Image (cartoon, grey):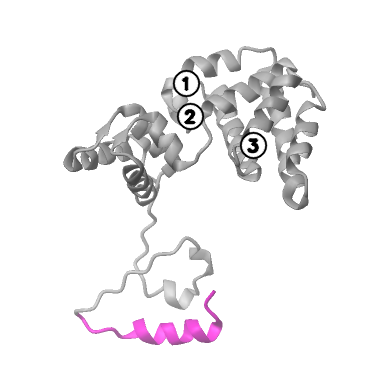
Amino acid sequence: MITTQGWNAFLKCIEEPPKYTIFMFCTTDPQKIPATIINRCEVHSLGRLSDEQICERLGYICTKEGFQFNDMSLDYIAKLGNGSMRQAISYLDKCKDFSTDLTIQNVIACLGNFSYDIFFNLTNAIIDGNTELILNIIDNLYYEGSDLKVFISKYLEFLVQVIKYIVLSDISCTSIPKRYINDLEYLINIDDKFNSFNSIMTRVMDIKKEIKIDNDIRTTIQVMLISRKGGEK
């Protein structure tokens, strides 16, 4: 967002700083920084933390603060943090305000996120061509007041993780909690699973594009989900 004039003024601030001064700059868009600034900096690229590292820290915080928790709840929060300790701690803080008893049910209820159970049920329904169940799942989300655009985005992320598991055969390489390993194995127990899930994922991507300017999102999602049977190329 900084203009050319702004960058030039910024450069003056760091050109000849006093010896006792250290500037620390953080950005998620390093490619936008002019070379005149980069050349005067020591660059460190910070990677994302693993879910195990985040869980360990969250567990330490909960123990110190006297919160009741279990590994399943912390794993869920860590997955949502997506490698960011700050984001994960922010989620933990929200959950604490909701209840200091951090059960998986309380965590899901507090964060307003969509349960993996819904994702698995919907995907199985699509694969089985269970039209009634597909319609019921979307109707329930709608009447609960869920943001269906957010749901489709989250569901698309879930399908990507399923495909990662199909390719890598390691649930730790995905964002799906380990407690769902049996559900995941059951889900992908179909013929030509890679192409089948790729077909579902493509359909959901089309839905995501379609509902951007749609006035009746619920109907559009339902029609596009039941228009073809799961796995159809």
Find residue 18 and report its horizontal and vertical position in percent. 23, 84
- Is 7 contained in the magenta span? yes
Q: Quadrant of the C terminus?
A: top right
Q: Which residue is mark 2?
A: 176
- Closest to the camera, between mark 1 and mark 3, is 3
CA distance separating discs 2 and 1: 7 Å
In the picture provided, is 96 more to the left or to the right than 147?
A: left
Q: Which residue is mark 3?
A: 143
Q: Quadrant of the N terminus?
A: bottom right
Residue type marked 2: Ile
Q: In the displayed structure, would residue 186 be above or below residue 76?
A: above
Q: Residue at x 37, y 75 (%)?
A: 40
Indicate which disc residue 180 carries.
1
**Magenta residues, as a range?**
1-19
Q: In the displayed structure, would residue 60 be above or below residue 230?
A: below
Residue type marked 1: Tyr
Find residue 154 and report its horizontal and vertical position in percent. 58, 39
- Closest to the camera, between mark 3 and mark 2, is 3
Q: Residue at x 75, y 30 (%)?
A: 225
Main SS class of the magenta portion in the image: helix
In the picture provided, is 82 more to the left or to the right than 129?
A: left
Q: Residue at x 40, y 36 (%)?
A: 107
CA distance separating discs 1 and 3: 27 Å
Disc nearer the start of the sequence (3/2): 3
Residue type marked 3: Tyr
Find residue 174 and report its horizontal and vertical position in percent. 48, 31
Query: What kind of element bears circle 3?
Result: helix
